[in-house]
Amino acid sequence: MAELAVHTLSLAQFRSHARAKITVDPRPVAIHGANGAGKTNILEAVSLLSPGRGLRRAAADEMGRIDAGVGWRVSAEITSLDLVHELETSWQPNTSRKVKINDKAATQTALGRIARVLWLIPAMDRLWIEGADGRRRFLDRATLSLEPGHADVVLAYEKAMRERNRLLKDGVRDAHWYRALETQMGKAGAQIAANRAMTLDMLEAAQRSAQTAFPTAHLSLEQPEGQALPSSADDLSEALADSRVADLAAGRSLVGPHRSDLVGRYAAKDVPARDCSTGEQKALLISLILANGRALKDSFGAPPLLLLDEVSAHLDPARRAALYDEIGALGAQAWLTATEPELFAELGTRAQYLEVQEVGGISQITQE
């Protein structure tokens, strides 16, 4: 099986890291240090090797060192499917974020064809009990990992919807202004729905085929108020046209995949994920990330990079050991953080270790 692994990661003026270079091998990377030392910033840097705004969903101008007044750069040498690539993403004041692949300008979507990255961070722990927006982002991130072109389709849909919503808020009633936008939303929206359905099927299959210590989740997509999401581009465009009167009253589009909600159930107990205990909800999330990793290994040809922030602190020793065993079985280069090195005890020599300390407001990295 081919591998996907970071070999060197270089940071310049990124978050709390003035300058750093990390050299690692394909084994898991266990990072420990006090809260606020800069551990998560390393994971965020790795997350920027894939399309999007990274694991914190931060704007580019928020990622530079505080008060430094300059831009930032993240670069890496990685192996993906037996090919070596040099990836770089950077930002300078008053510009947009830039991407280079092998020293040539590239798009963020192109990153997704080289590096597949999944993450689980503490902010996601409330996924099942908060709003549908977060669950759609979670599903779309999984979909993007399996189909990098999903990003462009989502952008096309959202652009057309913003323009349609502007017409609605302005009270425009002339059908001529809506038709082209609704055609665009229909085409992109149907593709979004198809991509999401494919992802759910692949996650379900990956869960069924694995022997795992983590609970299986049944997943489905639901529309609000018992609506059905039209499956074809023409049907969705027609549904948008039929909804104009209600949409004008609401000032926004009420029909489409942007209203879908990801619903999960704890399979063994047949209980909605939102009604499970905090520990069960976390275990379901870990199960889905691992299933996503297995699906990627089958479809992409290599396991993804896994970014697991403080995940071990919420697991008992038996579950921690089970997680580390599953990461090993997957063959993924996982980047994990914890406040204490003892939380990585079950990894032993299967991992390499970094300690991060904060010294005078700047993160310092020691490779052990």
Image: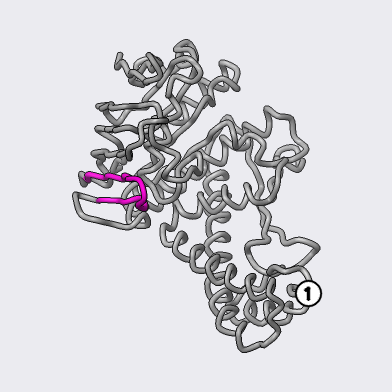
Asked whether residue 157 is drawn in magenta, I would say no
Residue 90 in picture, x, y percent from top left: 31, 44
Q: From the image, which quarter does the C terminus lie in?
A: top left
Q: In this rendering, is residue 276 above or below 229?
A: above
Magenta residues (range):
85-100
Q: Which residue lies at the image location 40% right of the left edge and 19% below the top edge?
A: 361
Residue 146 in picture, x, y percent from top left: 44, 54
Q: From the image, which quarter does the N terminus lie in?
A: top left
Q: Indicate the quadrant where residue 271 lies.
A: top right
Q: Which residue lies at the image location 52% right of the left edge and 68% below the top edge?
A: 159
Residue 334 visible in rendering = no
Q: What's the residue type where badge 1 is placed?
A: Ala
Q: In this rendering, is residue 345 above or below 133?
A: above
Q: Residues within 10 Å of mark 1 (few under 14, many from 20)?
A: some
Q: Which of 227 and 350 is in front in this view?
A: 227
Q: Nearer the viewer, residue 291 or 235?
A: 235
Residue 334 in picture, x, y percent from top left: 40, 31
Colour scheme: one colour
Q: Which residue lies furthest to the top in this view?
A: 342
Secondary structure mainly formed by the magenta segment: strand
Q: Is residue 141 left or right of residue 96?
A: right
Residue, disc 1 = 246
Q: In this rendering, is residue 41 above or below 163?
A: above
Residue 272 in picture, x, y percent from top left: 75, 43
Q: Which of 62 and 270 is in front in this view?
A: 62
Q: Indicate the quadrant where residue 122 lies.
A: top right
Instruction: Please count the marks in the image.
Output: 1
State the SS at label 1: helix
Q: Which residue lies at the image location 36% right of the left edge and 25% below the top edge?
A: 29
Residue 185 visible in rendering = yes
Q: Which residue lies at the image location 60% right of the left edge and 84% below the top edge?
A: 177
